[in-house]
Amino acid sequence: MTTPTPLVRDRALALSSEELPAYLYDLTALREHAAAVRAALPERVELYYAAKANPEPEILTALRPYVHGYEVSSGGELAHVGKAVPGSPLAFGGPGKTPAELASALELGVERFHVESVYELHMLAALAVRQAPGRRITVLPRFNLPVGDGALDSVSLAMGGRPTPFGLDPDQADDVVRLLTDGTCPQLELRGIHAHLASGLEAAEQLAVASSIVSWSAGLAARHDITLHEVVIGGGMAVDYAAPERRFDWAAYGAGLERLTAAHPGLTLRIEPGRALTAYCGWYATEVLDVKHSHGEEFAVVRGGTHHLRTPATKGHDQPCTVLPSDAPWPHPWPRSAARGDRVTLTGQLCTPKDLLSRNVPAAGLRAGDRVAFGLAGAYAWNISHHDFLMHPRPGFHFLGGTEEG
Ligand SMILES: Cc1ncc(COP(=O)(O)O)c(C=O)c1O
């Protein structure tokens, strides 16, 4: 269970059946959370928001006072974020960038390039000569670094510490440094190192990973007698869908990062969380269409489904939710279907048994017409969903607690 904020609860109950499902974002809650995250971070730790988690312009704008910049991972995100929050620093990542994407990044004056291969390094150097002659282009090669003691073994989304298509292999590091310092890529400035090794790490695991990225980078710098000014230690702060009230321990993380920066004077660290910043501000609110009994179990079919909120299907969890009983008079001449037992599985309208939003939810007395608000739907939710499957209508979008509510 997760309790919607009063703004979300009131709107979920006020919307008509036809206006559901709807994504409801509480921008006041988002701003408060982002301010607390920022306050927990010490000096010399920069906060970039990974726009892939939720690129809605209202979300990007609400975060703006609290972040140093935005991490984008495609030409599409680059153009979109550049338009939504003009003038904000951008870092451009992604494992397979096209020449056209790099060219538009150069044109837009992207501040940081996270270069993911030697091929990409050469391509960027050549494009810089043509597109931005004489301009210094700041690069942070991304490395897929090994992490000791099986630290990433338990995480569901690991991009590093094992064979993956992300970033450069550590054994290419010396060649990459040479390419960036021997005049081969004259406009490219080696500013630091980037690593994003996994998503779903708790504070202690994040700190262990950060410390190994920083020591590896320091070793590389010492070997080549160069200064690395910045190290990006990635995003991936855990969001616990099974315990939605529990939050990543930003205070412990901030304290650990303070120790790390103190040990490396002159070094700036950068983090780029997505999920842990925006997951909590979003709800997917909908209505129970029907309650069915099937072979001893109960199912409530709601308007919408995983084609709008793919998160539980893709991550294999039960999306935390709250039932909001509707006391409006039943408007139909036919009987209102209702749960007989205590536990109900909430499914969507798709013709597939995979359209499961939440299993065995304690929902005694749940009836058709009741509302359900699924929480932790502010990240990797609508924007990763297969909207067009079965051609159901799209949800509404409401940004609450902003200057202009919609
Ligand atoms: C390079 C990079 N940085 C940051 C993130 C954000 O991760 P999360 O949303 O888990 O914080 C991702 C997610 O895939 C990523 O690939």
Image (cartoon, grey):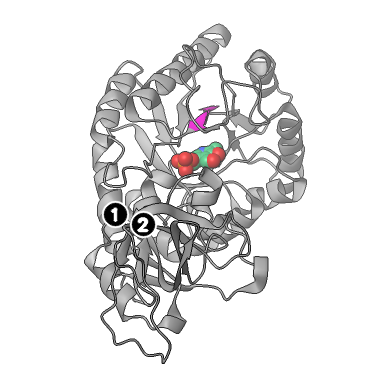
Place of residue 380 in the rendered image (x, y in percent of width and height, measured from the top left): 50, 52
Place of residue 372 in the rendered image (x, y in percent of width and height, measured from the top left): 36, 66
Q: Quadrant of the C terminus?
A: bottom left
Q: How many marks?
A: 2
Q: Tell me the element at label 1.
A: loop
In the picture, residue 333 is in which quadrant?
bottom left
In the picture, residue 343 is in which quadrant?
bottom left
Place of residue 261 in the rendered image (x, y in percent of width and height, measured from the top left): 33, 22
Can I make out residue 344 in this image?
yes
Place of residue 336 in the rendered image (x, y in percent of width and height, measured from the top left): 38, 80
Of residues 346 and 273, the one nearer the viewer is 346
Q: Which residues are magenta?
A: 193-198
At horizontal 57% and vertical 62% (from top left) the residue drawn is 307
Q: Which mark is residue 28?
A: none
Q: Which residue is mark 1?
A: 2
Q: Are the two marked residues, 1 and 2, in contact with CB atoms closer than 8 angstroms?
A: yes
Q: Which residue is mark 2?
A: 375
Position above or below: 226 against 135: above
At horizontal 27% and vertical 32% (from top left) the residue drawn is 42
> Of the residues shown, which amino acid type is indicated by label 2?
Gly
Position above or below: 240 against 321: above
Of residues 48 and 310, the one nearer the viewer is 310
Can I make out residue 64 in this image?
no
> Of the residues shown, which amino acid type is indicated by label 1?
Thr
At horizontal 29% and vertical 62% (from top left) the residue drawn is 364
Outermost residue on the top side: it is 223
For marks 1 and 2, give the CA distance.
6 Å
